[in-house]
Image (tube, helix red, strand yellow):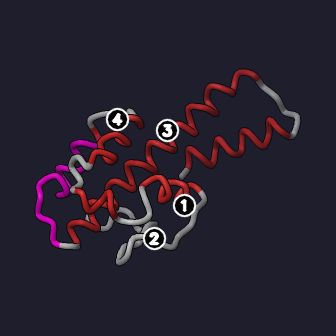
Amino acid sequence: MGFVEIANVAVERWKAGRRNDAIMIPIIYNYRHGIELVLKAEIREAAACLRGDGVADPGVQVDGVNEWVSATHSIVVHMQRVSRGEVLDDRAAACPPPVEALMVARMHNQSASPWPGCNAMGLGAGM
């Protein structure tokens, strides 16, 4: 995830004594945007898993998922929709681990997928 990595580099430079107040907002923005992209990727992955399980609901089809993740950049809105089971059916919310855990794993570059039958780092397959 490039946005998180660049923010990490900037923070390490800051901690090493190369402080520049002008880069604080870009650091925060890069972390925030990286989290948004990870969340959207995990939503797409969960939808792909549901399609693989035979769910035919339009809300989990590629076009339906792309439409709703592209509709806003609000992390809160996406988390609320996932928590309420919108678009993704109730099985997505019941699948361990929760989206939050997948986001943390993705941000730490863990390649093993906690979703049975899915490759967490192979996003884009079917998307």
Q: Left of 90 or right of it: where is 77?
A: right
Q: Label 3, secondary structure: give it.
A: helix
Q: Which residues are magenta?
A: 54-69
Task: Give the main secondary structure, helix, strand or loop, of the magenta stretch.
Answer: helix
- Picture layout, residue 22 above or below residue 73: above
Q: Quadrant of residue 97?
A: bottom left
Q: Closer to the N terminus: mark 1 or mark 4?
A: 4
Label 4: few (<14), some or many (≥20) within 10 Å?
few
Q: Residue furthest bottom?
A: 117
> Are the residues flagged by discs 1 and 2 in contact, CB closer than 8 Å?
yes
Label 3: few (<14), some or many (≥20) within 10 Å?
some
Give the label on residue 33, or none.
3
Residue 105, how many percent across, how many down?
54, 60
Q: Closer to the N terminus: mark 4 or mark 3?
A: 3
Q: Label 4, secondary structure: give it.
A: helix
What residue type is disc 4 on?
A: Val
Quickly name the residue at label 2. 114
> Are the residues flagged by discs 1 and 4 in contact, CB closer than 8 Å?
no
Q: Nearer the viewer, mark 3 or mark 2?
A: 2
Q: How far apart in space, not on screen, are marks 1 and 2 (Cα)?
A: 9 Å
- Name the residue rendered at 68%, 27% in the picture: 24
What residue type is disc 1 on?
A: Ala
Q: Label 1, secondary structure: give it.
A: helix
What residue type is disc 3 on?
A: His
Q: How far apart in space, not on screen, are marks 2 and 4 (Cα)?
A: 24 Å
- Name the residue rendered at 12%, 58% in the picture: 57
Quickly name the residue at label 1. 105
Q: Quadrant of residue 21?
A: top right
Q: Closer to the N terminus: mark 2 or mark 4?
A: 4
> Are the residues flagged by discs 3 and 2 in contact, CB closer than 8 Å?
no
Give the label on residue 77, or none.
4
